[in-house]
Amino acid sequence: MNLLTVGLSHNSSPVRMLERMAVGADDVGKLLHELLRSEHICEAMLVATCNRVEVYAVTETFHGGLDDVTSVLSRHAGVEFSELADHLYVHYAGAVVEHLFSVAAGLDSMVVGEAQILGQLRQAYSDADEAETVGKTLHELAQQALRVGKRVHSETDIDAAGASVVSEALSDAENVLTSLSGRSALLVGAGSMGALAASQLKRLGVAEVVIANRTSGNGDRLAESLRSEGLSADTVALSELSGAIRDADLVVTCTGAVGAVVDTATVSSALAERSSDAPLLCCDLGLPRDIEPEVAELAGVTVVDLESLQRRLADQHGGGARQEAGDIIAEEVRSYLAAQRSAEVTPTVTALRKRAAEVVDSELLRLDSRLPELDTDVRGELARTVRRVVDKLLHAPTVRVKQLASAPGGSGYADALRELFELDPQTAAAIGTPQAVEEGEHAVSGTRTSVSHAQPPRAAAVSRDRSEQDGEDR
């Protein structure tokens, strides 16, 4: 079994394709089960955020797993693979570990170092666990990735600025409106991103926040929380958006709805009823977008959305903190892959010890038949002596083989051990089933693959990165 990641993100895809691929909360379980019903996939986890959709899978074969995942993603997006392929990236075996650790650390985010990804990864694992599509392999990988992400954030200044997609969007809004202090804001959506937006709006000094949400209870709770912090906050129904937009200086949307929530007619009607010519700034943080694209063409309206943020943030770096984070990830990748390589030989070592015990038992039975009159105490001492000799003979080679197997290129030691001691491969596999084998059969080399629309997934070329084969971070 091997790890496979297939996905697209702000780094590989325009927002229009991310919108088509967007996975609503209600669809996560459905996609996970569809993935697990595929022929070659044994475990699956789905990470879906405002700027990425990624499938992490444990698969029997690379090409079979790639076919299965891309088929599911294509059906979900309603596009042909040829249209999707140019925007996909593929990671295999050790490269999956490096990629997920980088994602958890915020190095692959639109806003480098943003901490929200840790909560999103935790939710992705929770969803897969609830759907029963994650097993031992993805469980251990996800938990390790979360630990690595926390370590990066605690040991570096990668998130010193506290930036996020929300804060960057509101920074653009502040530049357009000069200042948000004393302004009135309409917040459409009261989920986790809505709560983050509300907190940022309060920090930036808005005078009033009006919340519109599909579920009134969530909107009421967020409004009450803001009021308890001294900010004027109220709620309206989605049917009352026109009036709320009319009175707002700033509209922030982050609903996660499938279709547009704020349409052009509603905004146009609101603008016609405004008592001043003050500009209206809209921040659309939804994926797919919450505000119809035509709204940006209305006079007096400026729209900041994920597409404009993607363009502005494309060349951001992260300074020395990014290098420090990369060093931590490289160390963690090496450690994780070494542990996986060491685990690969464990079932074979166990089978060797089992074989040795069987030989000892057989010889002791033969001794019983040849010397039935042997004193019981002497017989017991002989048995203990023979077992000690065998244990001592096996101790050094079994410890050493685990050490050798944990090093880069050490995947052949288990095979050598089976060959030297004439161990049945099926016996070793049976000893390791199901958990030890899942640990042991991870490939130790990493492979990165880009998918071209000119080739079907089965024909996609696989180029090996030498540094990943050695367990190193690029």
Image (cartoon, rainbow, N blue to C red):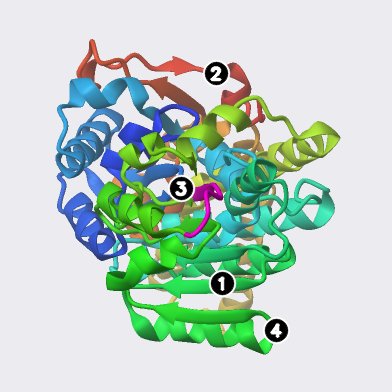
Q: Return the disc, 1 or 2, that comes first in the chain's sequence.
A: 1
258 left or right of 124?
Answer: left
Range of residues picked out in magenta: 275-282
Q: Which of marks 1 and 4 is in front?
A: 1
| Cβ atoms at labels 1 and 2 below 8 Å apart | no
Which corner quadrant of the image does residue 250 belong to? Answer: bottom right
Q: Return the disc, 2 or 3, that comes first in the chain's sequence.
A: 3
Confirm whether the magenta stretch covers residue 278.
yes
The residue that mark 1 highlights is: 209
- Mark 2 closeness class: few <14, some 14–19, many ≥20 residues within 10 Å: some
The residue that mark 3 highlights is: 440
Between marks 1 and 2, how big is the CA–CA gap? 51 Å
Q: Which residue lies furthest to the front in this view?
A: 275
80 left or right of 348?
Answer: left
Between marks 2 and 3, how big is the CA–CA gap? 22 Å
Q: Nearer the viewer, mark 2 or mark 3?
A: 2
The residue that mark 2 highlights is: 465
Which amino acid is tagged 4?
Answer: Glu
Principal SS element in the magenta part?
loop
Which corner quadrant of the image does residue 409 belong to? Answer: top right
